[in-house]
Image (spheres, grey):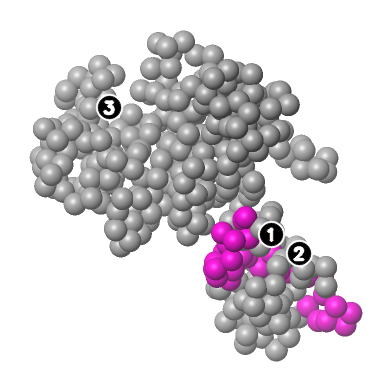
Amino acid sequence: MSAMMEAAEQDLSANAAISVRSLWKVFGPKADSVAGSPLADLSRADLLEQTGCVAAVRDVSFDVAPGEVFVVMGLSGSGKSTLVRCLTRLIEPTAGSVLVGGEDILTASPARLRELRRTRFSMVFQHFGLLPHRRVIDNIAYSLEVNGVKRDLRHKRANEVIELVGLHGYANHYPEQLSGGMQQRVGLARALAVDPEVMLLDEPFSALDPLIRRDMQNEVMRLHRDLGKTMVFITHDLAEALKLGDRIAIMRDGAVVQMGTPAEVVGNPADEYVADFVRDVPKSHVLTLAAIARIPKEGEALDGPRLEASTLIRDASPVIAEASGAVTVVAKGEVVGVVTSDDVLRVISGESTAARHESS
């Protein structure tokens, strides 16, 4: 790792909304003896055979910046849901540290932990967990009720959040009178009512049909844009991860196998496991011009159209196709390279970013 990259990582860690270091969750007898021992190097299957233990989360470290949407994805059994539950100690980690706003959650007393759960972070689960005998407004206000907020004040706040999540007119309905998507809006509103610093969403839309799921994804994007909340979003759906995530961590057998922006994950998969995940992703919908910009060839003019490096290839394609020569790619006013139709075609045909740069 370069000195510049190390400095960037240290800066992110120092200012992180969430900072996770060497986090382990091991189930089984003598679980405490696994982390930091030679047993930690065993595969999941070998560890189970030799010790009777299962390492659901294996030495995971990451930072989440304030206002970032950090997506953790993986197949069933990869450890992603166990990980998010460890962040709030709904499941007690075996080893490691979890800092939220600089405070180590793993050392918090039971009373302090309850306070943090009520005030600093909220969770939204796949199963809505609404109280069937309470109206929408009272379900949303419940998170404030347990904090001792008086009825008038908690209803005022609940009505504000009802408007925020698009439930106007449904305050006095009961959960059974709502569709699945509207029930999940109630779940989101309940999580937002306490104005948390961090929102943890554990596959919240997995039980919804595709059209409602898309609408709820758009709703999360809108809420994030309007409120700027820090979010950790768990999913097994790559399209959902690419749509929502500022960065994505892909898990396998309890460990993170790759972490990066959507463009980094799609453009340069770390191994065959990740490559299988992203194989069918339309790269032009994810990669930006920055991913394919190359050094101009000798004699190649820079007098063509100029486009920002952050432009998606899909959106830049019409301009590139109509240009008589190379399109100049700029970032912060500085030229970072050029792109032609041939470069775009190589992306669409599936050539990796690394291979393109090696051949340029």
Quarter of the image containing the C terminus? Answer: bottom right
- Is 233 drawn above or below residue 282 in the view shown? above
User: Looking at numbered disc 2 in the image, what kind of residue is underneath it?
Assistant: Ala
Residue 279: say if magenta. yes
Where residue 41 sits, quadrant-wise, is: top right
The answer to whether any part of residue 93 appears in the image is no
Q: CA distance from mark 2 to mark 3?
A: 49 Å
For the point 23% across and 50% down, which residue is it?
180
- The residue carrying mark 2 is 354
Quarter of the image containing the N terminus? Answer: top right
Q: Secondary structure at mark 2?
A: helix
- The residue carrying mark 1 is 268
Residue 63: say if magenta. no
Extent of the magenta region: 273-302
Query: Which mark, by number, is residue 143?
Result: 3
Q: CA distance from mark 1 to mark 2?
A: 7 Å
Task: Find the residue positioned furthest to the right.
Answer: 298
- Asked whether, in this view, residue 210 is left or right of residue 252, the answer is left
User: Looking at numbered disc 3 in the image, what kind of residue is underneath it?
Assistant: Ser
For the point 63% across and 60% down, which residue is it?
275
- Asked whether, in this view, residue 137 is left or right of residue 16, the answer is left
For the point 58% across and 32% down, which residue is it?
48
Q: Dot 2, how many residues are within 10 Å of its Cα: few (below 14), some (14-19), or many (20+)?
A: few
User: Looking at numbered disc 1 in the image, what kind of residue is underneath it?
Assistant: Asn
User: Percent from the top left, x then y, of residue 237?
Assistant: 46, 55
The answer to whether any part of residue 37 appears in the image is yes
Which label's residue is closer to the chain start, 1 or 3? 3
User: Which mark's residue is nearer the viewer, 2 or 3?
Assistant: 2
For the point 48% across and 22% down, which residue is it?
92
